Image (cartoon, rainbow, N blue to C red):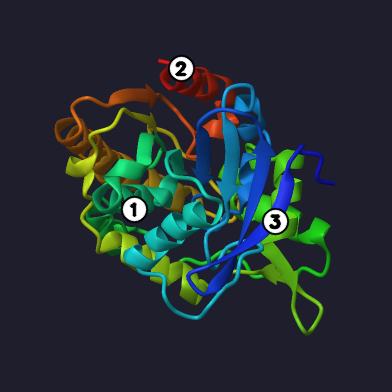
Amino acid sequence: MDTSPHKSDFVNVNGINLHYLDWGGKGETLIFLTGLGNSAHIYDDLAPRFTDKFHVIALTRRGHGDSDSPENSYDVDTLTEDVSQFMDALKIKKAILVGHSIAYIELCRFSALHPERALKFIFLDAAYDRTKFKVFAEKHPLKGVQPPEQDCHTIEEYITYTKRIAPELADIWSELWDEETLHIVQISADGKVVDKMPDEIAQKIIDASRNYPPEDLTIKVPALSIYAIWDHYLFPDYLTEEQEVLLIEFQNQVRLPIQRECIKQFRQNVPHAKIIEIPQGHHYCFIKQEELVYEEMRKFLLE
């Protein structure tokens, strides 16, 4: 059951309906953008903590959650225009933009196109040049290995299955994820619980991100970038010991060095940014390490 104290509504922008949550509050507007696959409800715990100083909103991207899912138009410019028109529709002239994960592409493009409308940027394990990520698919040692398939006919079965194949989510599962799940799945015609977002749409957004050199040089306003260091790994139970060893090698020899390269690049391109690194951090650092992230965000926002 959704107990987060917000208004849930839709706005028609750029030819589609986008879902958003509004927790209220007075002050400058703080807009949260989600990572790939998530809805605005992913911020149900964190966002309300800022309403004492800010007007807090979270937007669900097209193709996600309760927002419309057109077959096409998932390029960086369209996704960014959605954010701009969303602000127009709510009569928000300027805002502080917070983005998790893949939302970095929208925030960077927004900085390039609408620098006068951004007050500050906060990146939650997001500030990565994803053109460097193409090597992940090329060098992944288990790219042909798929998780065991299972038909789920109830939300409970879907959650149990998700926890099994995604131990990194099982590690942070809570009532928040129970609620989030209700907004990112649907019942298929044959009665199965399936993801709302088709794989084709997810791949279009991934491709768009990996073909977009981030325009972080355009970021002139104050910026905070929090990085969850990829120095550990949780394994699903269907992998063999040999496969786990291969994944550890891939993590240490490919993923971690590229992460370090991306952090160094961001430091150089945005020298005024405040950088926070979380050793053994979780990609959903604002959930797993919520207190640390909240405190760093609050200090930065009130400076």
Residue at (58, 26) in percent of width and height = 290
Which tag, 2 or 3, sits closer to the chain's start?
A: 3
Which residue matches tag 1? 105
The circle drawn on residue 229 is: none
Label 2 vs label 1, nearer the camera: 2
Percent x, y of residue 34:
52, 49
Residue at (38, 59) in percent of width and height = 80
Query: Can the viewer see residue 48?
Result: yes
Q: Could you say which quadrant of the image residue 213 lies in?
A: bottom left
Percent x, y of residue 302:
46, 17
Residue in front for this viewpoint, 206 or 151: 206
Q: Residues within 10 Å of mark 2 (few under 14, many from 20)?
A: few
Outermost residue toward the left? 268
Residue in front for this viewpoint, 150 or 109: 109
Which residue matches tag 3? 9
| Secondary element at image label 3 | strand
Which tag, 3 or 1, sits closer to the chain's start?
A: 3
Q: Amino acid at mark 3?
A: Asp
Residue in front for this viewpoint, 58 or 228: 58
Which residue matches tag 2? 302
Residue at (62, 45) in percent of width and height = 42
Which tag, 2 or 1, sits closer to the chain's start?
A: 1
